[in-house]
Structure formats: structure tokens, C-alpha cells
Image: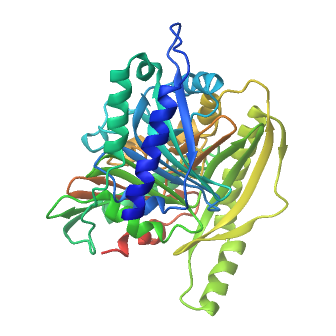
Amino acid sequence: MKEWYQLKGQILKDLIHHLQTGGEIDQTREFFHSYTIRIPEISFINLACTLKNQTLCYFKNKDNSRQFLGIGITALFQYDNDFDNIQELLEENPALVFLGGQSFFNEPKIAYEWEDFGERFVFLPQVLAKCENQEYTFTFFYSDEILSSIEAQSRFIFQVEDILSFRPYLLENRFEFNQSLHEPGPMQWNDSVKTCTDEFREDPDFHKVVLAKKETYLSLKKINGLSLLKEMHQYADDSYCFYLQTSPHQAFLSISPERLFTLENDKIVVDCIAGTRARGKDQDEENRLSHELLTSEKEINEHRIVADEIFERLEYLCDQVLTPQKVSLLKCKYVQHLFAQYSGVLQAGVSLEKIIKILHPTPAVGGRPWHLAQDYIKNLEPFQRGFYAAPVGVVTSNYTEFAVGIRSCLINNKALHIYAGAGIVPGSIGQDEWIEVHNKMKNFLQIF
């Protein structure tokens, strides 16, 4: 703790000097400034758990090469086409970094449990902790208004000091829930799967729909989202970790194996994940299940449906698309999937807003064709998906990465909502898909 106070003191001293010798105010438009300093290596999860109650977002990519922790809000973007506004701001100041995500559907009325998140929740933080290429930095973002007077600068310094104040949470060592609810229940789930497979037989152009399930667990007291983040982060070595907290007891957490896309300069990379088996209890069972997955006609067909759609969408965005030579296995903690990776060279002038609208949702979480699948999802799922299976991630001037927000949960005061889904294709059996969804939820169920 002593080291943290010393570091915080030096940070504030450097920031005050920067503001006092800062740039000119631009009266013609809103402009956001940034100031970056290097810091010693620090645990972003421990840092998040010692900060004052506030909005924050944590994002770690799948290969653990980048981490971001955004704290406090300088500017918030919540509406359709806001990524166009974000790109304009990045052209003015390439040092800006934006974190957040959006909902799966643009709902006419948002369910009460998702009200804090809205249609989209992407923000420029006040303070950003970043680890990239093993280099740790703090960056402070502020508007022209902060440079307008000494009083405004003083208020900003007090805000930053308040953000970085050491106020440790009383983290939970164990989670206790006294009630659970399945939406849908087993009978309704089986009926929904049969509805889809019947329709596949009637319509040969309808190939796949992804149905999701929600399990809600109720606690006697409000759930601290950061306790769950700290618990789950240890299982995210080979997965994305995304956590968006709008208040101390309202947060969305995803430990996702699936990339929607990574964009670096003009190269875009997209994951193709579909087809599932559980992991084996021993090596013999693991080998058997892996062989089943690699040779199953149903699972191979499901993966091909996703692969064909991703290739077609990338052709719409790219001058050149590179296809994988073979399908491999992606092994997660409790399940394994068929996996391939596509990449392409982006066409000139393609906006971030367009990329997201073209790629989301992939058939891995939506269906094929999407114009048919979305109607079945909306009619058969008895809940709103919110940020589940939706794009979540980070946007910068030269690097943007979005995960697909699967293997996820929503903390809503005393309720923990856990989400997972299964791809329904010709040959799907309701009971088998129910078991698959349960296996995908095990990351969270094992904390009980």
C-alpha cells in the first residue's frame, strides 16, 4: 500500500505539471487531450479491486499480450453510428482509447436488468491503465474544458485523486445463492429445438439458428462484481476477459474464447468457431471426444455453415481474403470446439461502424441466413440477450479488437444471470444441446 501511495503521489505531481504547461484550447470543436506516463508493473485486477466505486472496464486479449483498464468517464457513446464519431476523434488525437460494447439486438425497449448498459456503452475513460509489449502506462484523458481555468484544472486533479484513492472492496471469498431459475426450462427448450429442426426440413435455405439459455441465481445480498472478476480471471489464460461495471453491483463479465475481429492497420482477422464436445476426464476420454468432434458430420456441417458465412462477409469488406488450410481444435477449460481463422486486407475507406454491422452477429452466435434466424431467436428466447454474444472490446487508432461476449454473466444487484447458447442445425437433439449449454456454463457454475 505504501508503494501505491508513493506512485499515486508522483502521478498527480506529473499530471499537475503537464496541465500547467498544457496546450491551447480549440474553440472550434470539442477536443480531447491525453497525457501518458510509464509506471512499474502492476496487477490490473488488484488495482480494479482497490479503487473507489465507479464505472470501469477491463479488457484482456486472448493471447495475453494486451491489457486495458479504463476508469471513470470522460466521454460516453451510447447510440447507433457512434463509432463514426469515435473514428473522427481518433483522427484528431490518435492517443485516445475507447472501451466497451453494445447489445446483441437493437431492442425497441430494453429489459430492466440491462437498462444501465443501453443499446451501446462505449467510453473514453478519465484514467487508462495499459499493458502492451510488457510496457505499463497510465494515460489521462480530458477535454478542452479542463484547460479553460485553474479552477477546472483543480477539479480534474481532485477527480483523478479520487479515482486513484485506495478504498479496498470487501471481496467475497465464496458465493452463496438460495434460488435459481432456468429460462427456458427443459420442456420449452426441447420444443424450441424441435421447432427449428422442423423448419429446416421445410425450408432447405434455412441452415442454422443459435438458441441461448439463461440461468438466474439469486443471492441474499448484493453481489460484488469485482469479486467475480477476480475469481474468474484466473480461468482466462487462453480466453478473452471483458468486464464492464456501471456501478458496484451492476456489471457484465465475459470469459470468451471467440474473437469477432482484430484490426491492425489494414489487416483484419476473424475467428470461426462452431461444433462442441466436452473435455475428457482423462486422456483416453479426451482423445475419444476430440475424435468424435473432428469426424462428426453434424458438427462439421455446423462449422462449415459458419465458415462459409464469414468468408462471404469478409469478401464484402476486403480486397483479399486468406482462408485457413485446415480446421483444428480449440480446447477450453470445459469444452472444445472446431476452429479456423480467416484474415483479409481491408478495403480503403471501410469504417469501423460498417465492419461491426457486417460481421455481427456471425452464424456462430446468430444463424444462417440471419434474416430468418433472428426471428426465431426473438420469438423463442424468453429473455433479452443484452450484451450476451455481442461485440465487446477496445478501439484505438492503430489497433481494434472485439471479442464475442459469450460464456458470460450479468451481475444485477442480488441476481446473477448466466448465459450460454448452442447452434441448432439439422440433426440437433434438444437434450444433447441442453447438455452442451450446461457444459459452456461450467466456468461460472463451478464457483458455487
Can you see residue 91? Answer: yes
Quadrant housing residue 169 = bottom left
Which quadrant of the figure has residue 107? top left
- Tell me, yes or no, if residue 421 can be seen here: no
User: Is 114 or 12 nearer to us in this picture?
Assistant: 12
Colour treatment of the image: rainbow
Q: Residue at x 42, y 23 (%)?
A: 146
Residue furthest top in the image: 28
Label total for image:
0
Q: Percent x, y for residue 158?
A: 32, 36
**Who is closer to the viewer here, 394 or 345?**
394
Q: Is residue 40 above or below residue 153?
A: below
Q: Position of residue 336 (x, y in %)?
A: 60, 72
Image-quadrant location for residue 354: top right
| Residue farthest to the left, as pictured | 220
Which quarter of the rendering shows the N terminus?
Answer: bottom left
**Residue 219 horizontal side relative to residue 244, left or right:** left
The image position of residue 446, as x and y in percent, is 37, 76
The percent position of residue 217, horizontal first and vertical second, equals 25, 63
Question: Is residue 445 or residue 5 the one in the foreground?
Answer: 5
Name the foreground residue: 120 vs 189: 120
Q: Residue at x 62, y 64 (%)?
A: 275
Q: Quadrant of the C terminus?
A: bottom left
Q: Is residue 369 above or below residue 425?
A: above
Q: Is residue 262 left or right of residue 447?
A: right
Is residue 209 shown left or right of residue 448?
Answer: right
Image vertical order of residue 52 relative to residue 286, above or below: above
